[in-house]
Image (cartoon, rainbow, N blue to C red):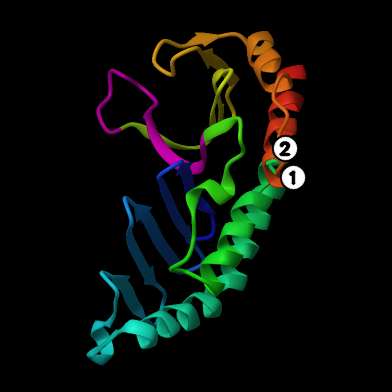
Amino acid sequence: MTEVSFTFHCSEDSLQFLYNYNLVNLESAFINGSKIIKLHTNNSRVSFENGRFFDPHNLIVKKGAEAEESIKDQLKNVKDIIIDGLNKASIEFDLPVSLIKRYVDDLSERPLNLKPTSYLDFEISEILLEINKVFFDRNLNMAGDVIPQRILKLFIKSKKGCTRLQIKEGSKTTLEYSEDCELWSEDSLKVLSIVSSLHPTIIEVKELLDYLKRVCRV
């Protein structure tokens, strides 16, 4: 596909990254100590799960250190394509993606030794950054009359509250806040207040907060 789509969702005990661009489809998940990596390209379909590397096309199964080296080699082969897609998304939405790029670098170098908290900050316990395409009904009275629409989502949970941003292609920007991440109110000034009260120590997280501030002030 020519358009980039991805989901980066990180909390204190889990991390999930989904990516699709230029014939590279990657799924990596680190949840409750379990590590799963699935990589599909135009000429290979491999996976890593439960300490084993699987290449069903070539009937290969490896475990232990061999399994780790094999999945590392596969990830290094597609790292440049993944970074290229993230750079494209960054230009398209004027969006900082350095946090995800750091994750991609780490994933290709030490895929089994990643900690979700490495991508958070002491005041921030959850980050969701997503660009995907969804389909909306153009005409509610005519079944099947749908249009594709690109959507950017940015969600940040902090000690000061929760904020979320949604930008629909060709539509308005929505900024919301919540004290409990359940009941939401649309209020860009409140979002700006929450984000401005945070003091991140990780530069990539600071870039995301600065991006939110810019959107709030538009």
Q: Are marks 2 and 1 in contact (CB under 8 Å)?
A: yes
> Is the residue 96 above or below the residue 170 in the image?
below
Q: What's the amino acid at mark 2?
A: Lys
Q: Position of residue 114 (x, y in %)?
A: 49, 60
Residue at 55% across, 10% down: 186
Q: Magenta region's main secondary structure?
A: strand
Q: Quadrant of residue 80?
A: bottom right
Residue at 52% across, 66% down: 107
**Quick check: is 214 in the magenta stretch?**
no
Crowdedness of circle 2 by 10 Å Cα count: few (<14), some, many (20+)? some
Residue segment shown in magenta: 126-144
Q: Is residue 49 left or right of residue 202?
A: left
Crowdedness of circle 1 by 10 Å Cα count: few (<14), some, many (20+)? few
What label sits on residue 203 in the rendered view?
Answer: 1
- Residue labelled with disc 2: 206
Q: Is residue 99 left or right of residue 129?
A: right
Q: What's the amino acid at mark 1?
A: Ile
Residue at 42% across, 64% down: 25
Quarter of the image with the C terminus in it: top right
Name the outermost residue toward the front.
122
> Is the residue 11 above or below the residue 195 in the image?
below
Which residue is nearer to you in this view: 198 or 92?
198
Q: Position of residue 195 (x, y in %)?
A: 68, 22
Residue at 43% across, 54% down: 18
**Quick check: is 127 in the magenta stretch?**
yes
Q: Position of residue 181 (x, y in %)?
A: 44, 19
